[in-house]
Image: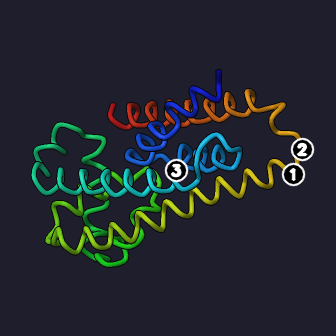
Amino acid sequence: MLEVLIAQYGLIAVFIGAFLEGEIVVIAGGLLARLEFLSLTMVLIVAIVATFLGDLCFFQLGRKKGSAFLEKRPHLKRRSERVRSLVHDHHNKILFFYRFLYGIRIPTLLALGTSELTTKKFVLINLFNSVLWSAIFVLGGYFFGDVFTKVVGDIKAYEREIVMGLGAVALVVWVGSFIKNRIEYD
């Protein structure tokens, strides 16, 4: 039953996770590919597409709604203001490394959208960043799975516990992030 659920919804979870800053979900996708629940190629493709589209959406949101959107979300506004000065001073560095800035990626994209950066330049660099980021995290999960199978041995005997554990870790990380954002908002 568990294999069927993962086969049906695993790539959807990878898409949603990659779209919304989900390193843990993308790593888990790589691990599930190593455990042969998902196709490594499909996990990688889905992560690249979702990451690219997610970043483009947040960049365009910053471009179209920028200040108005941030005014309604004080927790994002505070982060974006910090990022905006960095974007101004270190435009090209931020553009290449924003993808690896955990927790401030969305505010960075909103700030980049409000900058003078052209959409064409953003799209080209975003494509490169999406491929690089996805490859690092998906393959990281995949190769961690290889080490994990050597340490644990017969992984099929523990597959339910492993998947449940991965789900629990992803849930804890998401809830922790949600609570942190709410505390910063208040």
Q: Does residue 107 lie above or below 13 as drawn? A: below
Q: Secondary structure at mark 1?
A: helix
In the image: residue 168, left or right of residue 49: right
- Number of labelled discs? 3
In front: 8, or 22? 8
Q: Residue at x 44, y 66 (%)?
A: 131
Going by the numbered disc 1, the residue's amino acid type is Lys
Q: Position of residue 172 (x, y in %)?
A: 57, 31
Distance Cα–Cα, label 2 vs label 3: 24 Å
In the image: residue 133, left or right of residue 2: left
Q: Give the residue at mark 1.
A: 150
Q: Are marks 1 and 2 in contact (CB under 8 Å)?
A: yes
Q: Residue at x 58, y 53 (%)?
A: 40
Going by the numbered disc 2, the residue's amino acid type is Gly
Q: Quadrant of residue 59?
A: bottom left
Q: Give the residue at mark 2.
A: 153
Distance Cα–Cα, label 3 vs label 1: 22 Å
Q: Earlier in the sequence, mark 2 or mark 3?
A: 3
